[in-house]
Image: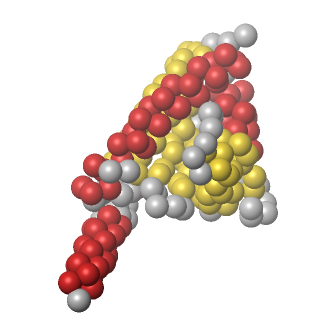
Amino acid sequence: MVNTKWQMAAAGLIALLAALYMMEVAVNDDEAVIIGSTQVIMITECSRVFQFVGDLSNYAMWFPGIENMTASSPGPMRAGKEFEETVILPAFGEISREVVVTSYSVPRQLQFVYRDFSQTMIAIELIQKTADRCHLYYSAATRRTSYLFHVTAGIPLRIMYAMRGRHAMFAIRSMFNN
């Protein structure tokens, strides 16, 4: 009988933690919490960079850890277009995640969100500073605003996007500054 009481208490605690963990998802993108950002300056025109970066099927070529990104909805690139991303994680194997483009403005901006527990939003913005200098800004934010999320899963997400974001900017710059 004692064992059952502890099992019930543990189950109740797990249910409470799960509810607290999933609560407080920001509705507006303005309320998202930035978990990583970086930038790079390239000696080229932004339209040339956006032609490559703005096509999410190329995302795996410059962002580390992504195995593949394929369109799962028909039609041209636009807000609302859906993709499926395949990631290979050493501890978990192959994982597929749904991605939805939320903003697409040629040749300046691309924004998409992951439809998973993290609700991560990626924003890529290109600004032509001079005729031969393009600034690429990359940021990752999460719609999750709960404290419990940020002290558990938020910490590895921040580390991952900080490291991978810098690696991605190095890869992009090496592609266009040759």
- Outermost residue toward the bottom in this view: 1
Quadrant (top left/top right/bottom left/bottom right) for the C terminus: top right
Placement of the N terminus among the 4 image quadrants: bottom left
**Residue at 71%, 48% in the rendered image:** 69
Going by the image, does 18 lie left or right of 69? left
Q: Nearer the viewer, residue 14 or 99?
A: 14
Looking at the picture, tell me which residue is in the foreground, 12 or 144.
Answer: 12
**Does the image show residue 99?**
yes
- Return the x and y of residue 171 as percentages of the image width and height: 64, 22
Q: Is residue 1 left or right of residue 107?
A: left
Residue 25 point in image, percent of width and height: 35, 64
Quadrant of the image occupied by residue 131:
top right
At horizontal 52% and vertical 61% (from top left) the residue drawn is 116
Residue 50 seen: no
Between residues 130 and 113, which one lies in front from this camera angle?
Answer: 113
Report the residue at 48% width, 50% height from top.
121
Residue 124 picture location, percent across and down: 54, 38
Residue at position x 67%, y 16% from top?
174
Q: Please give the count of numbered marks on the rendered protein.
A: 0
Where 91 falls versus 78 (above or below)? above
Residue 103: give x, y in percent of width and height.
56, 52
